[in-house]
Amino acid sequence: MATATLNATLDGARHAHYQREGYVVLRGLFTAADVDEMSAESDRLLERVDLMTPDNMRIRFKPHVDTGQQLFEVFDPFVDLAPVCLRYALDRRLLDALANIYGEEACLFKDKLIYKPPGSAGAHLHQDYIAWPRFPKSFLTVVVAIDPFDSDNGCTEVFPRVHRHGYLSPADGKHYQLDDAVLAGVEPTPLLLAPGDVAIFGCFTPHRSAANRSARWRRGLFLSYNAASEGGRQRDQHYQDFHAWLRDKHPPATRDRLYFR
């Protein structure tokens, strides 16, 4: 299935592609100089080893696909630590593209910096939507590639057109993996991205990624937004809800160890 591409913002054909397929790719939205700035800031954040503990709710680890060793993988959130990346998260080139999708302004809802180091395990098949009272159905995710995303390092794969079926899991506030059988007959589309490319997909678009089997990092900004009319600016509220959810997932005996820094 062809991937829609664009060198600026969304035109009518690309907007139609997003609505029909549940995703769109914008080639070269950010320049090489832009990517260099993002890369340098990503490297600087790796020096914040003081933050990298399992009890810090900002941090996530993934097991090495072969050895099981825990590898640092994600800052979530991160733009409060990364003013350069915050500037790009609010860049008009990106916000104008999202405004074309929404028909109105977009508001930053969630922000992750995913490093996906060599050996890191992949992400199971899932949809991003969670049936929380305040979770917006206009939620979409923007992937800004710092490094190439390819089949060797575990690029994101989306399942086109399935978003039309809405949420495929129980609406009980839990986060679910999807069984492959639910998507039988639907071929995934790998989001093969060069540095500076941007992929956009909605919260009902199922997606997954394989392990990073390469010797290269697969760094990317994973920025999520909601339509302004669906709650406005609610990033701070989302992270309060998210941290409460994380605490509830932990055994009572270990909850007191959790913190956010």
Image (cartoon, rainbow, N blue to C red):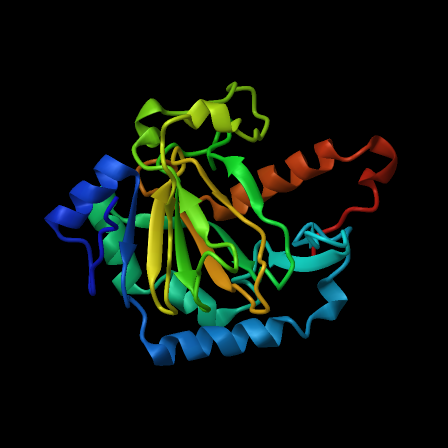
Specify the quadrant of the image occupied by residue 16: top left
Asked if residue 123 is positioned above or below residue 71 in the image, the reply reads above
Residue at 24%, 54% in the rendered image: 97
Which x, y percent locates residue 99?
24, 49
Which x, y percent locates residue 2?
23, 48
Q: Is residue 70 left or right of residue 147?
A: right
Specify the quadrant of the image occupied by residue 90: bottom left
Which x, y percent locates residue 41?
53, 75
Q: Is residue 132 among the parts visible in the rendering?
A: no
Residue 117 or residue 61, whichever sits in front: 117
Which x, y percent locates residue 215?
59, 69
Asked if residue 222 is positioned above or below residue 175 in the image, the reply reads below
Q: Is residue 107 left or right of residue 15?
A: right
Q: Quadrant of the N terminus?
A: top left
Asked if residue 41 is positioned above or below residue 7 in the image, the reply reads below
Q: Quadrant of the C terminus?
A: bottom right
Residue 176 or residue 241, whichever sits in front: 176
Q: How many marks?
A: 0
Asked if residue 24 is positioned above or below residue 229 in the image, the reply reads below
Q: Is residue 47 among the parts visible in the rendering?
A: yes
Single out the residue that lies furthest toward the right: 253
Residue at 44%, 61% in the rendered image: 149
